[in-house]
Amino acid sequence: MFDPSGNDPISPALQDLLKLFGQELATVKFPELDRAVLEEAAERVKDKAAELAQAQAALEAARQALYESQEALLQKGQRALAYARIFAEEDAELSAKLDSISLPRPVRKALRAEGAPVLEAPSAQGEENAPRRRGRPPKARTSAPLFAEGASPELIAAVEAESANGTLHTA
């Protein structure tokens, strides 16, 4: 009926009607409808909205607990799969069955500034199951000119040829 985007679950039009029955129409009574009946119904709406907020908070807590238990199961499953692969190294049939099982990588948690965990999803499908590169990252190469300033390719070739002959070049 009314989608409460604010804190009050009662629509502005109904609030205006309740005000009218609280002021100008306070003494007017219709069959089974008067100020008291409307105020009681408005209180029930507010109570149900509070119950809904509590249920939504409980639902979110249950979702978080489910997610955490799924992550714990996934971590245990990955360890069990690793142990089973080592165990089955001598058994080709069992190794083939274990190799057909591909578990997803767990989602890493990074901490926000407030300390609440933020879920980081894997960036690409191909990267999802790719192992991380090990070791030191490669050095960034600085771009240097191919030939030193003032040296021509002919001069460098002549110096290399003379050094191969064992004679020194004098300029």
Image (spheres, rainbow, N blue to C red):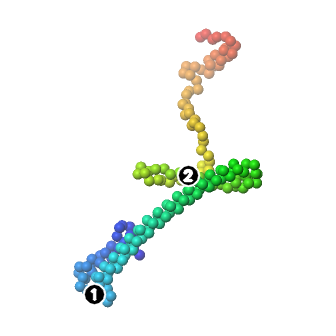
Crowd rating for badge 1 (residues with CA inside 10 Å; few <14, some 14–19, many 20+): few
Q: Is residue 57 left or right of residue 83?
A: left
Identify residue type, mark 1. Answer: Lys
Picture layout, residue 40 above or below residue 108: below
Looking at this view, is 28 or 74 the one in front? 74
Q: Are marks 2 and 1 in contact (CB under 8 Å)?
A: no
**Which structural element holds mark 2?**
loop
Which image quarter is the N terminus in? bottom left
User: On the image, numbered disc 1 is attached to which residue?
Assistant: 29
Q: Is residue 96 left or right of residue 11?
A: right
Looking at this view, is 28 or 56 the one in front? 56
**Which structural element holds mark 1?**
loop
Task: Tell me which corner region of the image, top left, top right, bottom left or bottom right, holds residue 54.
Answer: bottom left
Q: Is residue 5 visible?
A: yes
* Residue pictured at 55% horizontal, 52% vertical: 122
Q: Is residue 101 left or right of residue 75?
A: right
User: On the image, numbered disc 2 is attached to which residue?
Assistant: 122
Q: Earlier in the sequence, mark 2 or mark 1?
A: 1
